[in-house]
Amino acid sequence: MKLIVISLLAVGSWASSAAPAKSDAAAGRKIFLAKCSTCHGRDAKGSAVMAHLFRADLAKMNLKGEMTQKMNAEDVAKIIENGQPGTKMPAFKEKLKAQQVTDLAAYIKSLGAPKASKGR
């Protein structure tokens, strides 16, 4: 009987750890401002100064642009974790925890969300 209970507890804890984490775009915004805004700008449209310095296309640094907003959150998270080969975008998997990456990806995806209209 003890073996069954221990087995169920083990399976239960594995299942709960395998579940995807909920994202928090507000927490992601704080991370963005601290870690990403130097290159991507506080408005997430890209920093013209950094684009010039890196000899990069400013449009590719624009996280509100179509290229980024067409991606799903998982693909955005992969780029955050692994960087972008052939660019100055570094990998953050050793610098950010998994939850921070999830939150940051949620924030970036929220930049393309339609704004809620205010009452008329």
Image: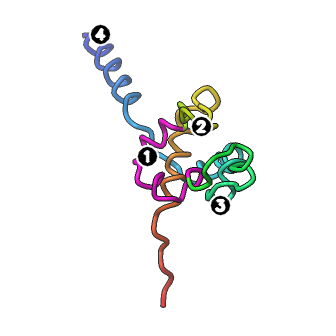
Image location of residue 113, percent across then percent down: 46, 64
Q: Are marks 3 and 4 in contact (CB under 8 Å)?
A: no
Residue toward you, 7 or 5: 7
Q: Please check the rendered image and state whether residue 24 is part of the magenta-colored stretch, yes or no.
A: no
Which span is picked out in magenta? Answer: 60-79
Q: What is the three-letter code of the residue carrying label 1?
A: Ala
Earlier residue among tags 3 and 4: 4
Look at mark 3 in the image and give the residue it sits on. 43
Look at mark 4 in the image and give the residue it sits on. 2
Earlier residue among tags 3 and 2: 3
Q: Quadrant of residue 81?
A: top right
Look at mark 1 in the image and give the residue it sits on. 73
Which circle, 3 or 2, is nearer the viewer? 2
Q: Is residue 98 left or right of residue 72?
A: right
Outermost residue toward the bottom?
120
Q: What is the three-letter code of the residue carrying label 3?
A: Asp
Determine whether the residue tagged by mark 1 lies in a helix, strand or loop.
Answer: helix
Identity of the residue drawn at 46% across and 58% down? 66
